[in-house]
Image (cartoon, rainbow, N blue to C red):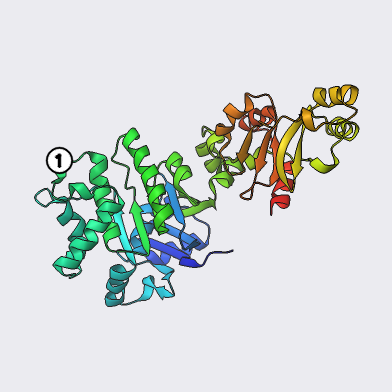
Amino acid sequence: MAMATKLSIKALYKIFGERGDEAMRLIESGKTKDEILAETGATVGVNDVSVDIEEGEIFVVMGLSGSGKSTLIRMLNGLIAPTSGTITIDGDDIAHCSDEKIREIRRQKISMVFQHFALFPHKTILENAAFGLKIKGVGVAERNERARKSLAQVGLEQYADSYPEQLSGGMQQRVGLARGLAAEPQVLLMDEPFGALDPLIRRDMQEELLELQRSLGKTIVFITHDLNEALILGDKIAIMKGGRFVQVGTAEEIVGSPADAYVEAFTKDIDRSRVFPAQRVAKPAEALQKADLVAPSALSAMERLGRDAIYVVENGKPVGVLRYRDAQGALQNAGGDCLSALVTSFPKADRKKPIFELYPLARKGLPIAIVDDADQLIGVVEPETIFAELAGDDETVEEEAALKTAAE
């Protein structure tokens, strides 16, 4: 079922400088950001950005320094007014509403978490987490209760009476996140929140954010300059360059089908096995029904498919895998009865499991059964197919499309 749009951005522009009208005309004529700066002295911060962000989605904007991503998120929060375009949240246009309305939206719907923790060293962790609520005029009892709840959500409730200097960098960033959550926002804006952390703590924070999102289901706009971080966190990812969205898609779409040479250059060193799901490299199962299983038909099916083993299903669920040599043995010694020859301890994986997690399963030397959420067999993965995908082999594209159609 399609999710509702929570945040909608349409034809959004931001130009800094006095000759904005002239800069807009140059944009329309196809001039680049650098050309416009040279001709007018105006800087194009955001250039014709349009996107719908779904409720409960982590939408990641990835770009290098100067790409426009921080300008974009500040417009989403009403801190910077756009030159033109609309930004609507639940039908309210942040770009064209009064200051009073923007303040109301910030109080009720949007919170922001920044890269630098901005914690007050003389205030306790509880006081820091409650500070945003204090600014909004929330009473002491209520703001402390909400702050304690948010600290509990990020695993820091026991540190409520501590001070920032007593916490590690990762823990301090969790306080910043708790401060954002204390406002109970519908939309959480995160501007490079983990950028100041060392790699190990950063990875821990990414996992904690994903775990938190599974329980809270917030709509999150996450800004980063790190593509690996974008691929880990994003339900959808926007690659930004020169103020524009070059490509918007899932991690698999970004890495598997880069829109241009710029995106391709970013993704060439990405570990594809951590991005692509098992379903991508699966072939149609072509399984046999347990009730109809006999050696002659099983051997014929494997010869036709060019496989050394084939899965057997009952009510759509895999119950075993039959190897070619075992089917031959059954034909010679058991009169064609193959049930006793089934390998019932077979490798199996969910279709969404990343490819790298299939490596241990491939060691069994059997095709891996790929199942859906109902444990229905939807495909098989041969070990050699995994390595073909990692090498960028596109021969599995048609099979992938067929499998997706069957799964849907």
In the image, residue 363 lies at what x, y percent?
62, 23
The residue that disc 1 covers is: 166
Residue most extreme to the left: 122
- The residue drawn where x is 43% and y is 46% is 63
- The residue drawn where x is 70% and y is 31% is 367
- Does 5 sit above or below residue 295? below
- The residue drawn where x is 51% and y is 34% is 270
Residue 355 seen from this side: yes
Q: Which amino acid does the dot numbered 1 rest on?
A: Gln
In the image, residue 259 lies at what x, y percent?
59, 47
Label 1 crowd bin: few (<14), some (14–19), many (20+), radius 10 Å: few
Please indicate whether residue 363 sits to the left or right of residue 80 in the image: right
Location of residue 256 by image quarter: top right
Label tally: 1
Q: Please name whichever residue, 307 or 58, is drawn nearer the observer in this view of the structure.
A: 307
- Does 271 sit above or below residue 222? above
Residue 289 seen from this side: no
In the image, residue 331 lies at what x, y percent?
89, 26
Please indicate whether residue 109 sits to the left or right of residue 307 in the image: left
Location of residue 45 by image quarter: bottom left
Please indicate whether residue 404 sits to the left or right of residue 77 in the image: right
In the image, residue 119 lies at what x, y percent?
18, 50
Looking at the rendering, in which quadrant would you find the C terminus?
Answer: bottom right
Looking at the rendering, in which quadrant would you find the N terminus?
Answer: bottom right
Please indicate whether residue 204 sits to the left or right of residue 161 in the image: right
- The residue drawn where x is 21% and y is 38% is 168
Q: Please name whichever residue, 273 or 147, is drawn nearer the observer in this view of the structure.
A: 147
Q: Secondary structure at mark 1?
A: helix
